[in-house]
Image: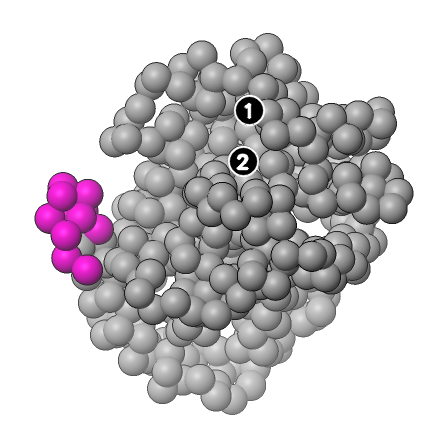
Amino acid sequence: MEKEKRSSFSGRVGFVLAAAGSAVGLGNIWRFPYLAAKYGGGIFLLVYIVLAVTFGFALMVAEIAIGRKTGKSAIEAYGMLNKKFSFLGWLSSVVPMIILPYYCVIGGWVIKYLVTFATGEGPAAAGDSYFSGFIGQTGQPVLWLTVYIAITAVIVMLGVEKGIEKASRFMMPVLVILSIVIAVYCVCMPGALEGVKYYLMPDFSKFSVTTVLAALGQLFYSMSLAMGIMITYGSYMKKDVDLEKSVHQIEIFDTGFALLAGLMIVPSVFVFSGGDESQLQAGAGLMFQMLPKVFNTMWMGGVVGAVFFLLVLFAALTSSISLMETVVSILQDKLHWNRKVTCLVVAVGSLAIGIPSSLGYGVWSGVQILGLSILDFFDFISNSVLMPIVAFLTCIFVGYFVKTKVICDEVKLSSPFHGEKLFVVIIKYVAPICIVAILVSSVLNGLGIVVI
Ligand code: TRP
């Protein structure tokens, strides 16, 4: 990946923008709201925020510091600090390979909705069975998946990511502003108050270990943690950039945006479902079912919808480009293939794995793995199994092999480390114990032995 001298980000702002650009994507807009709806609203939000300021903070500091210290991407960084942990670089590299194909399936849905709104068909999309009608087909979702992968692959192949990044520097703030407007509109709809309460007020009776596991997986996914990405970003960070402050800013931005997305989508369920709360369990399709209904009641809703889905497409593309880029450079480094060929192989591979995920909502809906649809299964394996394992091993690695002092010294190169004590306690004790407890009890729950 880094043949010549490593180029670096110009300063803190450059670093934060780049890392936040990778972090903000479908995870915030599509995944967070449907999980919040499904796992009890306010209680999910509370658990998520607590995890973000503790686990999320500690893990992001650790990953960025490892990257900055070694100047390497994950595959080499772990092994460089301790030979025994080379395997962790490999394990974390598997995660983006699993995520990329199904990320593109959802990206395809976004293009479909963009085209629908852009061609004035928005009102049709507000119909109750529009989403299921679309997703149940074979050709359409696969077509849009192919288009989405092709766009991503062409950008990576031509190496024009920089252009997209520049465009998204303008698009992202517009997306934030538009989302605020839509969220305010949603909250003010008649009947929305009930939903706002559900979303913001924790109901402790809905607490369960599954909620914690879901929130933990979402945290890793949304902040691009436990998959080596932040190590790579850290390797491009200059030694004088305030690492701790950067982490806080990325976290605030990423979490803030997820909260906003939830505010657009969760209360809408209460407005449009006419008291039928089972809609909260809709899962992966929730955003696509709810937002067209919102736009349909809005003045100029068709235009708002088209602009919104276009902006979401950009946010998704910056993430899938970075995902594909990661997979391509891992393969390239190890197999020494030519870049274009590698891109092509990754694109075709993603299509091959993406198609079953897409069909799992249609003709293959009978295929269930561990009781999950194919897409949900890939999502579960990466977010609820592999990422917690990588996170656990990273904590052990940092806490007991590299030693926290080495990481803290790296952070202190640029500025005092205010959260040092918190960092050390979480990495050495709290996070490893909690992650194991969460994983074990959720496996037991899965086997029908209810723990919490
Ligand atoms: N964090 C991204 C999002 O919220 C998704 C993502 C996961 C990602 N892993 C990544 C993006 C790796 C870029 C690189 O949508």
Graded by Cα atoms within 10 Å as few (under 14), some (14 to 19) or many (20 or more), the crowding at tag 2 reads: some
Residues under numbered marks 2 and 1 in contact, where contact means CB atoms less than 8 Å apart:
yes
Q: Upstream in the sequence, badge 2 or badge 1?
A: 1
User: Does residue 300 appear left or right of residue 213 in this picture?
Assistant: right
**Amino acid under disc 1:** Ser
Q: Quadrant of residue 207?
A: bottom left
Give residue 108's position: percent from left, percent from top: 63, 28
Q: Quadrant of residue 51?
A: bottom left
Check disc 2 and report its element: helix, strand or loop. helix
Check disc 1 and report its element: helix, strand or loop. helix
Please give the label number shown on residue 132. 1
Graded by Cα atoms within 10 Å as few (under 14), some (14 to 19) or many (20 or more), the crowding at tag 1 reads: some
Which residue sits at x=24%, y=66%?
A: 434
Q: Which residue is mark 2?
A: 285
Please give the label number shown on residue 312. none
**Amino acid under disc 2:** Gly
Which residue sits at x=47%, y=17%?
A: 362
Figure label count: 2
Q: CA distance from mark 2 to mark 1?
A: 9 Å
Segment colored magenta: 442-452
